[in-house]
Amino acid sequence: MQDELLIEQQGSLLLIRLNRPQVLNSLSLNMVRLLETVLDDVERDATIRAVLMIGEGERAFCAGGDIRALYDAGRAGEDLPETFWREEYCLDERLSRFGKPVLAVMNGITMGGGVGLAGHASHRIVIERTRFAMPEVGIGFFPDVGASWLLTRKPGHFGTYLAMTGVNCGPAETIHAGIGDYFVPEGAIEDLIEALAVLPRDAGHRDVTALVESLAQNTSLALPPERLALIDRAFSQETVEGILAALSRESDPFAAETLALLAAKSPVSLKVTLALYRMGRNAPDLRTCLEREFRVTGGMIAGHDFYEGVRAAIIDKDRNPRWQPGTVAEVSPDLVETYFTVRHRPLFA
C-alpha cells in the first residue's frame, strides 16, 4: 500500500505522484494518512522548498474517494465513512495553510477528493487534459472537500451551477470556477519540475509564483458571455424551485439542457447543496465550510439517496436511481435541516 504514493526528492522539490492509475488515482484512507506523514516530514526538512503533486498515468490526477468502499462500510454500519471524511477534510484544511509552497498539477480527471487535494494547494495548475467536475449530486451525495468554500469565492454563480449539475470543465473553466490558478502547457511541466528542484535556500511562495507565471499561458473560456449571464440569472435564485422556474423562462437551448441535468439529480442533494453553497458564500473561512460539510456527510450516510445513487451508478449500473423523496417539491425545509444535524465529534474542536 505504500506504493499508492510515489515519493521522490529532486533537489529542493518533493515530488508526489498519486499512484492508483487503474482506478483513476482515487483517494484511499491509506493515501490520506501517507500524505499527512509526508507533510510532517516536509515541515521538518529544511532542504525541501516546495512540494508538487501529480497523478500517475494518462487519465487522471485523482477522480475522488473510494465511493464503493464508503458505500459498503456505511451499509454495514462501520466507522470508515466518518474516519475517512474526517481525516480527508483535515488534510485538505492543512494543505490550505501549509507553510511551504504546494503545487498541484491537474493532469486529467480531477473530481471529488482530487479537488480537495488540488483545490487547496497554494499553486493550482491546469493543463490541456484537465477535466474538473463535482458530480456528487448525481449519486445522492453533495460536492464536499471544502468545495462550498472554493466554488463560492468568485463573483457570480458559476460555481453553484457546477455543483448542482455536475458538468465537467476544461482548463479555462476550471480557473474561472476558482479551482485552478494557472494554465501551463503539458509540455512545460517537466521544465517546471526541473526549475523547482534547484530553488535557492531562501526561496518561498513569491519565488514559486514567479516561476509558475513564467511558464503559464492564457487560455480562453469555451462558454460565451451570454451563457455565463444566463447561469447567473438562474442560479442566483434562492431556492431550487426558483432556479428551475428561471431556467424554464429562458429560450436558449442551454437552459433546457440544464433543466434535464437537474431533473436527473437527487432532489434531496440539490436542496442540501444549494443550502450549503448559499452558506458558503457568507462563510468567514474554509474551516467553517468543512465543519458544516462534515455534518452533512453524516446526514447522507444516515439517509437513503447516497446508497441508491451508488447502487444505480456503480453497483447495478442501471442508471435508474429511485430517489426518496422523488421530487424537489417534496423536499421540505425541515427535511433539509436534518442533514445539518451534528452526529459526530467536530473536526476542529
Image: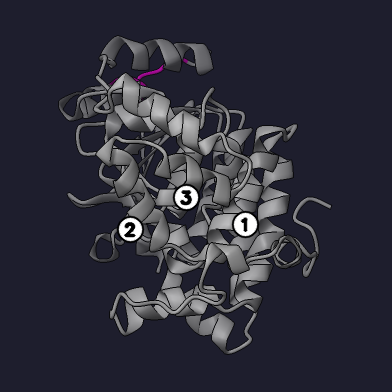
Which residue lies at the image location 56% right of the left edge and 51% below the top edge?
A: 241
Amino acid type for the residue under numbered disc 2: Asn
* SS at badge 3: helix
Q: Indicate left or right for 115 with 331 as reference.
A: left
Distance, label 1 to label 2, CA atoms, is: 28 Å
Residue 181, percent from left and from top:
41, 24
**In the image, which residues are magenta?**
195-200
Q: Is residue 198 magenta?
A: yes
Q: Which residue is mark 2?
A: 25
Return the x and y of residue 231 as percentages of the image width and height.
42, 33
Asked whether residue 179 is in view, the answer is: no
Q: Disc 1 on helix, strand or loop?
A: helix
Instruction: Choose between 245 and 75: the one closer to the eye.
Output: 245
Q: In the shown orientation, is residue 46 left or right of residue 288?
A: left
x and y, in percent, of residue 147 in the image? 54, 44
Compared with residue 193, is residue 38 higher up or lower down, i.e. above or below?
below
Mark earlier in primary sequence (3, 2): 2
N-terminal-most mark, 1 or 2: 2
Amino acid type, mark 3 = Met
Question: Is mark 1 in CB contact (under 8 Å) with mark 2?
Answer: no
Q: Classify residue 208 by image quadrant.
A: top left
* Residue that label 1 marks: 272
